[in-house]
Image: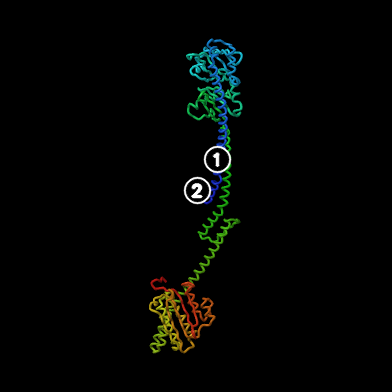
Amino acid sequence: MRSWIRHSFKNRIFVTVLLVTLLPLLFCDVLVMQVQRARSESSLATQAQAQLNGLEQALDTTCLSYRQAAKRLCGSTMIRNALNRKTANSRVVYQLLFMETDRLREHARFDIFSSEGKCLYSTVSPLPEEERNPRWGVLYAAGQTDGLAFGKGTGQTAMTAAQAVRGYGGRILGYVVITMTSTDFERLFDGLYSATHVVILLDPTWQTIYHTQPAQAESSTAALRSQLLAGKPLTGADGEYYYFLTRNEGTGLSLILQQPKTFSSQVMDTFYTVSILMGLMCLLLCLWCAWLLSRHLSQPVHQLDEAMGEIKKGNLEIHMETDREDELGRLTESFNRMTEEYRQNLVRSVARQRELNETQLRMMQAQLNPHFLYNTLDSMKWLGVTHQVPQVATLATDLAVILRAGISGSEFITLEDELELVDRYIDIQSLRFEDRFTCEIDVPDRLQSCLVPKLVLQPLVENAIIHGVVDREDGYIKLQAEEQEGDLLLSVYDNGCGIPPDVLARLNSKDQKIPGEHLGLFNVSSIIRLHFGEKYGISAETTPGDGCCVRLLLPIQKKENNNA
């Protein structure tokens, strides 16, 4: 999967869009469902607990009233005497029974039984004919305790509570029995719980005393009893309800409130089914949208990739058509421009290479001429020696030296070698002008090893001779070198006619449009600036009186530091 994603830009866009759109949707779907479910359950739990507290308070209040009434009846001397004599229909006993059970008779029936289990007095008429076994059930439980004992009723009776009436020495004289029916419990709990809830009341042995839905009493109570014994949460037989339990330690009664779940299993199954279907629909929609978007974005990139492949193969005629106006469209247009410029550069490069080859050929052909010139000058030199014409020999020798230096491969030479070439040139010009000028060279020895471009002083000296002292009989030229703030300053003075102001201004401004008769100075200045920058080059000034001074500034470079 990872290799498939990395293989293509389209695949990465597809997976990214799919994850960005689908995962948050599914996450929010599940999260919202769980949050809604939790909030609903919390709200219902709070409501159910409040209702259970109300039911418990009503039951506890009633049971407390029953205890108090039973205690007063069991402690009455008249009732003890009546039970001891085993007399029935005592008017005083009835008055006392009705007086002590006032306001309680609407929720329960009060009876007084003999020690043998026969009903002697009752708050209902006619007198019940039922008999109870004192050795079993609630009467037996009452005989084992001093208080009121509670237990499950029989028949139409939902719950029975009894307390033993004891004489002197603890002998049981009879029993006060309280009986509640399902109808009594309905009146007691009326209005204290919601219609959708179920109230269950269990005795200490978890037998059903009261159930709002009697038809489900046995099954639901059995399921709850088994879950309680197994230590599991109370969920009922089908798990569709929440159960809230409270137990009264004094009576041993357990009160349970059954609350239906907000989302039943059927509702949850339906919800999960709908969520899965919606998830599948969202997945298909996201797949479709991701595919369209990835195709829309990756198609120009794929075309560019194929075009680049064609260029690698040497096909420079490739041209991509696009009607997009976004970034990818501009990228395609840039690619077309780049391809066109590359093709034109290739054509220009081929043309330049052809010109370079032709130039090299001409240079190779031109290298034949110096050999011929050297031989000719050498012949002239020996001819001048043979015929005793030393001027011809000197001219030939000096010209050969200058020519050899001009076509040598080295671009930089020492200042000492440059001055030697200047000497050769001055010798030639002295013969030409019949010693009408003199030249003085003042260069310190420590600057003799500085490197300078070859033949940069000869044009300055030539300018001083041709445009300066040519018309004078006492011409004077001085060539001087000095160090100025870490740079080498070469100066050529003459006492000639000077430089015209317009030419002087152009020289000092480094104007490239120097008149043709000063082309040598322009070439020297251009060479210096190309090598060392605009800081360096030629400057000139008119000296007091006649003449001028041309200066050449360049950095100091020693032979051992030069890589030229």
Q: Is residue 461 above or below residue 92?
A: below
Marker count (numbered)? 2
Q: Amino acid at mark 2?
A: Trp
Judging from the image, what secondary structure is the residue with disc 1 in? helix
Whether residue 401 sits left or right of residue 179 in the image: it is left
Kindly identify which residue carries mark 1.
31
Quadrant housing residue 273 = top right
Q: Position of residue 212 (x, y in %)?
A: 58, 25
Eye-nearest disc, 1 or 2: 1
Q: Is residue 280 above or below residue 174?
A: below
Judging from the image, what secondary structure is the residue with disc 2 in? helix
Residue 272 in sight in this render: no
Q: Badge 2, how many Cα within 10 Å: few under 14, some, many 20+?
A: few
Q: Amino acid at mark 1?
A: Leu
Kindly identify which residue carries mark 2.
4
Image quadrant where one finds the C terminus: bottom left
Quadrant housing residue 185 = top right
Q: How is the structure coloured here? A: rainbow
Q: Position of residue 178 (x, y in %)?
A: 56, 18
- Residue at image position (58%, 47%) is 289
Q: Badge 1, how many Cα within 10 Å: few under 14, some, many 20+?
A: few
Among numbered discs 1 and 2, the one appearing first in the sequence: 2
Q: Residue furthest front?
A: 77
The one nearer the camera, 186 or 369, is 186
Q: Is residue 460 above or below residue 560?
A: below
The one nearer the camera, 429 or 256, is 256
Whether residue 389 sits left or right of residue 471 in the image: it is left
